[in-house]
Amino acid sequence: MDAIARKIINQLQGDFPITEQPYAQVAAQLEITEDELLQQLTNLLDQGLLSRFGPLYHAERLGGGLTLAAMPVPETDFEQVAAQVNAFPEVAHNYARNHELNMWFILATEQPERIDEVIQEIEAQTGLPVYNMPKQAEYYLRLKLEV
């Protein structure tokens, strides 16, 4: 990863401007052109150095559903099950964990009742139980990982 890619990633981890031309504003802060910034983002996504770049919406405040779910997945089937789970458009994140429940993911749905439906569909497709762990309280942590 080159120095400008590092600067871009570090810059875009917080305080993204809400303006008519946010990329132009960020590019000016980085002393590059807007086209160069957009091309760098495309390259980072194409190379897999960024898995996603975009806004995060609060599904519940928009009338939708949001939950954390976990599954016990046999290690030999992990990649296959991950592909099955990730194929659901409602799955926002999916992480491997060193625990009996070794696959954790976030479900975000347009309607709250869709959470249970998606869980049942994942269980039917994978043959594995899905543990639904809905939010009890909300905390905001500002996380910025310098590269």
Image: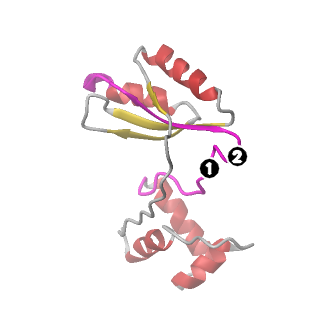
Q: Amino acid at mark 2?
A: Leu
- The x and y percentages for residue 5 are 43, 71
Instruction: Name the foreground residue: 70 vs 36.
Output: 70
Q: Which mark is residue 2?
A: none
Disc 1 is placed on an element classified as: loop
Residue lying furthest right: 20
Left or right? Give the position of 117 relative to 70. right
In this figure, which residue is indicated by the disc labeled 2? 62
- The x and y percentages for residue 119 are 52, 23
Residue lying furthest front: 137
Q: Amino acid at mark 1?
A: His
Residue 54 visible at all: yes
- As displayed, is residue 57 above or below residue 87? below
**Residue 108 shown in magenta:** no
- Mark 2 and mark 1: span between their CA atoms? 7 Å
Q: Quadrant of the N terminus?
A: bottom left
Q: Which mark is residue 58?
A: 1
Q: Residue at x 54, y 85 (%)?
A: 31
The residues colored magenta run: 48-77
Quadrant of residue 89 in the image? top right
How crowded pointer 1 is (Cα within 10 Å; few <14, some 14-19, many 20+) is rated as: few
Quadrant of residue 10 in the image? bottom left
Q: Residue at x 51, y 53 (%)?
A: 52
Magenta span: predominant SS is loop
Instruction: Name the foreground residue: 1 vs 114.
Output: 114
- The x and y percentages for residue 54 are 58, 57
Q: Residue at x 25, y 33 (%)?
A: 99
Residue 33 visible at all: no
How crowded pointer 2 is (Cα within 10 Å; few <14, some 14-19, many 20+) is rated as: few
Q: Are marks 2 and 1 in contact (CB under 8 Å)?
A: yes
Q: Residue at x 45, y 56 (%)?
A: 50
